[in-house]
Image (cartoon, helix red, strand yellow):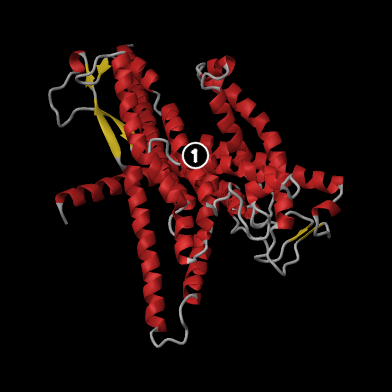
């Protein structure tokens, strides 16, 4: 074992020891795990009044699959979390766009600090409601119109949307709206009391729970494409499964590598903080995937809007353009068509640029550098520093954004070439969320452990200092 490997092993072992000996972090992990389990249990319970035989609801459809992804797996069982956090994410996108100097009052709120963020969050919660109602109705229509052939899905005993009464539709919508706000509430508790981003972890929980069933279905699909009469059937089957696993592992490793790669901008400190040791020079890390998993989730949420609108329309040219004619012909805005995939790719790249500039604000960083006496070697402070950081961020995004888009559309390309359903193919939105959210969760755990350890150490030092001072006073008297 090399010295670098031993050093890495020791650092990981040290981090794990710090985590599992820290009561605060253990408590936060327990809260997070408990709420995720509660969310998953709720996602498996079908709404009363809906008769849903096993595998009757077709979630292989691009629109249904995307809704199920954002719902954390709650759509496939038509649970109270069937709509999930999708409407909340859509509302977040709109509020963030409007608060980026498009509407001055909202832009001022965004710059007001914690108080302004709370106001924007309240606006987001109110804006979530109409999106939730619209998407809930779309889910009901999708359930009755998108069931597998030969299945018998019924809602309150009827199998057609026009047979439901207004009261029954309102009841279903109220349940789904309640499920969405419960999901947001659980996500808030995880974010504040647990570890990691709550909304992302709810989506991650649904994806992780489907990994084993997806692999099982993929192996069945591969076996079904083999010639059972061939003398080499077993060998071909084993080779096919091994190739599938190897390609999946390869894409997983590449995604982990890209998400862990950073561009380091060296930083110097004026005064006594100035250092001439190049090897120990502090730096500003900018990740190759600076925006994390947010661009993929945002793009998925935006792409569900046309499909949601299509569920309100009668069969006409507009609905045909969006979602097809319902007889196997895909519309231009679905992920089963080149135009839909291209649109999805473009949305991911655009959101990568947009959200990375929110996460790493060059203007704010430049101002902070000036106030703290820091500077980038060879770059003037002020506007030159701002332009330099913006240029580096732009270059990084031209690598990270297209990579995210390519991995996200890869399953649909593989499905077209191999015939394996896109939900079982390699790569995809789910894989990106798994990798990015898991890495963010690990970083959050390490950060919580470090912060908690620092607070404990400071408390001990302060208590020891106060105790010593009291002892000296007593001795003096």
Residue 359 at x, y = what percent?
42, 29
Q: Is residue 438 visible?
A: no
Count neighbours of disc 1 (C-alpha within 10 A) and say few if under 14, some if 14 to 19, many if 20 or more. many
Q: Secondary structure at mark 1?
A: helix
Specify the quadrant that holds the C terminus. Answer: top left
Res 370 → quadrant: top left
Q: In the orientation shown, which residue stands out farthest toward the front? A: 317
Q: Residue at the location (63% across, 39% down)?
A: 87
* In the depicted structure, whether residue 277 falls above or below residue 415: above
Q: For this view, does 475 lie left or right of residue 217?
A: left
Query: For this rendering, which residue is in front, 422 or 234?
Result: 422
Label 1 sits on residue: 347
Expressed as whole percent of the image width and height from the top left, the position of residue 154 reads 78, 60
In the image, residue 164 sits, relative to residue 232, either above or below, namely above
Is residue 102 left or right of 471 when viewed as pictured? right
Percent position of residue 6, x then y:
20, 51
Looking at the image, which residue is at 36% across and 29% down? 460
* Residue toward you, 180 or 463: 180
Residue 203 visible in the shown view: yes
Q: Residue drawn at (26%, 32%), measured in percent from left and top? A: 264
Task: Give the image quarter of residue 469.
Answer: top left
* On-image quarter of the N terminus: bottom left
Residue 383 to residue 277: above or below: above
Residue 91 percent across, percent down from the top left: 61, 33
């Amino acid at each position: 074992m090399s010295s670098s490997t031993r050093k890495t092993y020791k650092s990981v072992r040290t981090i794990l020891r710090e985590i599992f000996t820290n009561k605060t972090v253990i408590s936060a992990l327990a809260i997070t795990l408990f709420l995720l389990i509660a969310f998953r249990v709720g996602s498996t319970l079908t709404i009363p009044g809906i008769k849903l035989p096993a595998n009757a609801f077709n979630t292989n459809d691009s629109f249904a699959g995307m809704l199920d992804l954002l719902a954390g797996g709650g759509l496939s069982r038509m649970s109270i979390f069937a709509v999930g956090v999708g409407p909340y994410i859509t509302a977040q996108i709109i509020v963030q766009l409007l608060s980026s100097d498009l509407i001055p009052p909202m832009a001022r709120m965004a710059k007001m600090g914690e108080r302004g963020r709370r106001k924007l969050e309240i606006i987001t919660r109110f804006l979530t409601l109409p999106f939730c109602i619209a998407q809930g109705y779309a889910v009901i229509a999708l359930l009755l119109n998108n069931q597998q052939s030969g299945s018998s899905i019924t809602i309150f005993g009827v199998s057609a949307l026009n047979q439901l009464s207004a009261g029954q539709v309102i009841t279903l919508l109220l349940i789904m709206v309640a499920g969405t706000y419960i999901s947001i509430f659980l996500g808030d508790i995880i974010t504040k009391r647990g570890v990691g981003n709550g909304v992302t972890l709810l989506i991650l929980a649904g994806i992780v729970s489907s990994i084993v069933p997806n692999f099982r279905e993929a192996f069945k699909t591969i076996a079904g494409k083999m010639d059972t009469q061939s003398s080499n059937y077993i060998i071909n089957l084993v080779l096919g499964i091994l190739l599938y696993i190897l390609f999946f592992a390869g894409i997983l490793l590449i995604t982990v590598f890209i998400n862990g790669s950073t561009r380091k901008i060296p930083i110097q400190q004026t005064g006594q903080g100035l250092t001439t040791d190049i090897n120990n020079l502090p730096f500003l890390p900018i990740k190759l995937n600076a925006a994390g998993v947010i661009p993929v989730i945002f793009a998925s949420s935006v792409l569900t809007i046309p499909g949601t609108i299509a569920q309100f329309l009668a069969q006409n040219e507009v609905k045909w353009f969006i979602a097809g004619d319902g007889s196997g012909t895909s519309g231009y805005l679905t992920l089963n068509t080149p135009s839909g995939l291209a649109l999805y790719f473009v949305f991911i790249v655009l959101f990568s640029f947009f959200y990375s500039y929110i996460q790493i604000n060059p203007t704010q960083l430049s101002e902070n550098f000036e106030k703290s006496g820091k500077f980038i070697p060879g770059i003037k402070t002020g506007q030159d520093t701002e332009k330099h950081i913006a240029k580096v961020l732009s270059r990084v995004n031209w690598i990270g954004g297209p990579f995210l888009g390519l991995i996200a559309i890869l399953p649909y390309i593989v499905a077209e070439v191999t015939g394996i359903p896109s939900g079982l193919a390699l790569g995809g939105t789910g894989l990106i969320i798994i990798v990015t959210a898991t890495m963010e969760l690990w970083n959050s755990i390490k950060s919580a452990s470090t912060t908690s350890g620092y607070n404990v150490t400071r408390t001990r030092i302060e208590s020891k200092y106060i105790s010593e001072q009291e002892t000296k006073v007593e001795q003096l008297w």
